[in-house]
Image (cartoon, rainbow, N blue to C red):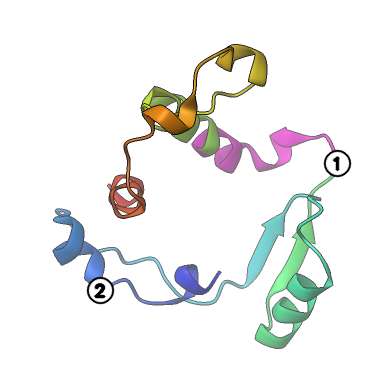
Amino acid sequence: MLYAFLPKEHVQTQFHTQHAYLAFGIPEVLVVDNGMELDRDLELACLQLGIELQHMPVRKPWFKGSIERWFRTLNTDLIHVTPGTTFSHFLERGDYQSQHHACITLDKLWELLHL
């Protein structure tokens, strides 16, 4: 959340993007699913920052279709085509040793995500 809030003036020069990355600031509303990692700390942070926290219904991904689609695109077009992928399901992986084929650095991943 901190990265989302902060200005990203470095993006254009660091990643050589054509346009500035203008999205930043504290949101009015934060829409989340019901994952176990979303606990009381997130609720307290949103309360302190004046962010309305909305929980989506369980097992109804169409309520947050745009972010689900972004995750799908990210997985199919970037993550699962990169050497070292862990695949979507362990049966797909078979005997493939992801750790022996991994070749992307965290810095490169940040760049790809921004582009």
Q: Of the numbered discs in the image, which one, if any, rests on residue 106? A: none
Callout 1: helix, strand or loop? loop
Q: Of the numbered discs in the image, which one, if any, rests on residue 9? A: 2
Q: Position of 32 compared to 1: left or right? A: right
**Residue 34 appears in view:** yes
Q: Residue at x 75, y 49 (%)?
A: 33
- The answer to whether 40 is drawn above or below residue 54 in the figure is below
> Of the residues shown, which amino acid type is indicated by label 2?
Glu
Q: Main secondary structure of the magenta part?
A: helix
- The answer to whether 80 is drawn above or below residue 37 in the figure is above
- The answer to whether 9 is drawn above or below residue 20 in the figure is below
Q: Position of 31 compared to 44: left or right? A: left
Label 2 Cα crowd, 10 Å radius (few <14 / some 14-19 / many 20+):
few
Q: Residue at x 53, y 30 (%)?
A: 72
Q: Of the numbered discs in the image, which one, if any, rests on residue 58? A: 1
Residue 23 on image: x %, y %: 39, 66
Depth check: 96 or 22 in front? 96
Magenta stretch in the rendered image: 58-70
Q: Residue at x 28, y 48 (%)?
A: 108
